Image (tube, rainbow, N blue to C red):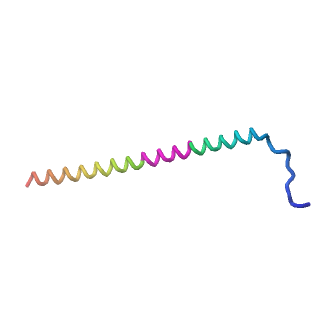
Amino acid sequence: MTGEEISGPPGPKLIRLIYFVGAGVICTAAINKWRDYEKKTIIQQQQQQAAETQKSSESVVVREALK
């Protein structure tokens, strides 16, 4: 007993290639989804900051107009 596992013959090379390509496609799709999610999050944060900046600048203008 050498400690090696006994297994059957390896699968055909074409099937292994298809699995490998399929895994690559799935990983690429997941990475692209993650990038889209991150991009959307950054855009939303920028829009919120712009809205807050606009509100604060409007309140300053209103305060100056009231003086």
| Image coords of residue 54 (percent x, y) | 24, 49
Quadrant, the C terminus: bottom left
Q: Nearer the viewer, residue 21 or 53?
A: 21
Q: Is residue 30 magenta?
A: yes
At horizontal 85% and vertical 54% (from top left) the residue drawn is: 5
Q: Is residue 7 above or below residue 15?
A: below
At horizontal 60% and vertical 45% (from top left) the residue drawn is: 27
Q: Is residue 38 magenta?
A: yes
Left or right: where 2 falls relative to 28:
right
| Image coords of residue 29 (percent x, y) | 56, 42
| Image coords of residue 44 (percent x, y) | 37, 47
Magenta region: 29-40
Left or right: where 32 falls relative to 9:
left
Quadrant, the N terminus: bottom right
Q: Nearer the viewer, residue 11 or 34?
A: 11
At horizontal 62% and vertical 44% (from top left) the residue drawn is: 24
At horizontal 43% and vertical 47% (from top left) the residue drawn is: 39
Number of residue marks: 0
Q: Is residue 14 above or below residue 34?
A: above
Residue ranking furthest to the right: 1
Left or right: where 11 falls relative to 49:
right
Predominant SS along the magenta part:
helix
Left or right: where 20 falls relative to 55:
right
